[in-house]
Every structure is written in C-alpha cells, then in structure tokens.
Image (cartoon, helix red, strand yellow):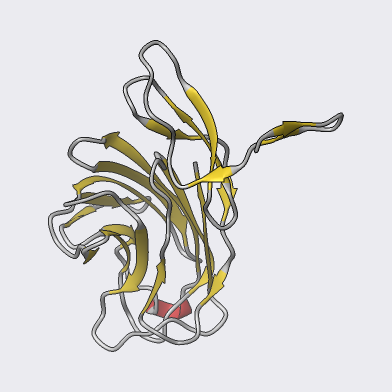
Amino acid sequence: MSKITNTGIFITEGAAAGTDVAGNGQIWVKSDTPSSLYHTDDAGNDHRLGITLGTESTTTGGSSIDITSIPSGVKKITILITGLSANADSNLIVQLGDSGGVETSGYVSTTSRDSGGTAAFTNGFNFEDEGSGAGGETWQGVMELCLQDSSANTWSSWSMSGGSSQNFHQCGTKSLSATLDRVRLTTTGGSATFDVNSGINIQYQ
C-alpha cells in the first residue's frame, strides 16, 4: 500500500501500470532491479522517467561484451567507452538486440574521419573504421541511440570517438524485430579480442 511520510512518497512496486482510464495518466513504480519510475498515458503508452547509470563492464579478452536487461519504455541509450583497444586490427561496432537475440545485419550506418573519407556499414553502428589494434590505438567515445519509431522499433544513432591519431563521427538507423533489450560492443576483425581492462558502460532513460 502506498503511503506519504514527512520525508517522501512511497509507491508500492508493480509489474505493469493499472487499467487505462480515459483522460487520466498514471505515475507508478515498476518492479525492476532496482525499481524504476514510469508515467503511463491514457492511451496505455509507458514512458520511463529519469536516467539510470549502468555498472561499468571491464573486458577480459573476449571479442564482444553484451549489456542486457535494458527495461521496456527506454527511449534513449548512451554508450560510453574508455581505454578500449584490441590485440589486432578490428573495427569496433555496436549491435542492437531484442528477445530474439542480437541482430547482425540491416544497419544503415556511415562513419567519417577527420583526415577525410567515409565508410558505410550494414553489420552495426561503428565507433571507428580504422582498426582498433592499429598502432596500439586506444579509443574513447560516446554513442547515443534514440528511439525514432516505437511501432517499428527503429533506432537512430550518432557517435564521436577518438584514438591517438584521429577522431571519427558516425550516424545511422536500425529497425528491430521487437522491443530493444540489449546492446553489444564487438570487434569485427577475425580473431581480434579486446585488451583486458577496456571499459564500457551505458546510461538509459
């Protein structure tokens, strides 16, 4: 049962909003771990409120790292990388996924570099297209994913990243088969693996 005290309002957690009522919206707390605050409009659309910072993942030598259990109702995701490098030349890409798994095709993505030139990709959103192992490059960057069309699960992406020699800019779109609930950062260069202690984290709202 919800209650009001002299220091706050306590709302009991629930798995979903209550029954829609025309002309009324709902504020409720979803029983995520940790719990999260939602507004549901009178058409039954859920809007997640606030920004959640994930727990930084440190790579341990694998070729990919997945961040899963992104809750429904999220409309913006920010991916942050720091000190990221690999043991061989490899593009660094972000792939999106849903309950059916990570999708590895159907991306419309273009990357440009400060030194000139562009490259197009269909297997993911690229942080860079030079090769993360080239010359011992170490990468920092931010990628933002924004929900463009909830009916088609279409996401738009842009990013900026930088290594020791130049910066990259990326933009793209991707439609999923279902609601997004995971993202993957991966290498694309054969046997290339991330160096230990490379970091990745996300914020979502």
Residue farthest toward the top in the current orientation of the protein: 23
Q: Quadrant of residue 124?
A: bottom left
Near-viewer residue (107 or 163): 107
Could you say where residue 203 lies in the image, as x and y percent from the top left? 53, 50
Q: Residue at x 59, y 64 (%)?
A: 55
Percent x, y of residue 52: 57, 48
Task: Please name the residue shown 36% across and 60% down the image.
Answer: 182
Please give the name of the residue rendered at 50% of the width and 85% of the height, measured from the top-left corner: 60
Residue 71: where, in percent of width, then height?
43, 51
Q: Would you place residue 53 above or below residue 7 in this image?
A: below
The residue positioned 15% from the left and 58% from the top of the image is 122
Q: Is residue 178 above or below residue 90?
A: above
Q: Position of residue 83 (x, y in %)?
A: 55, 70
**Closer to the camera, 71 or 95?**
71
Q: Specify the quadrant that holds the N terminus.
A: top right
**76 shown above or below 128:** above
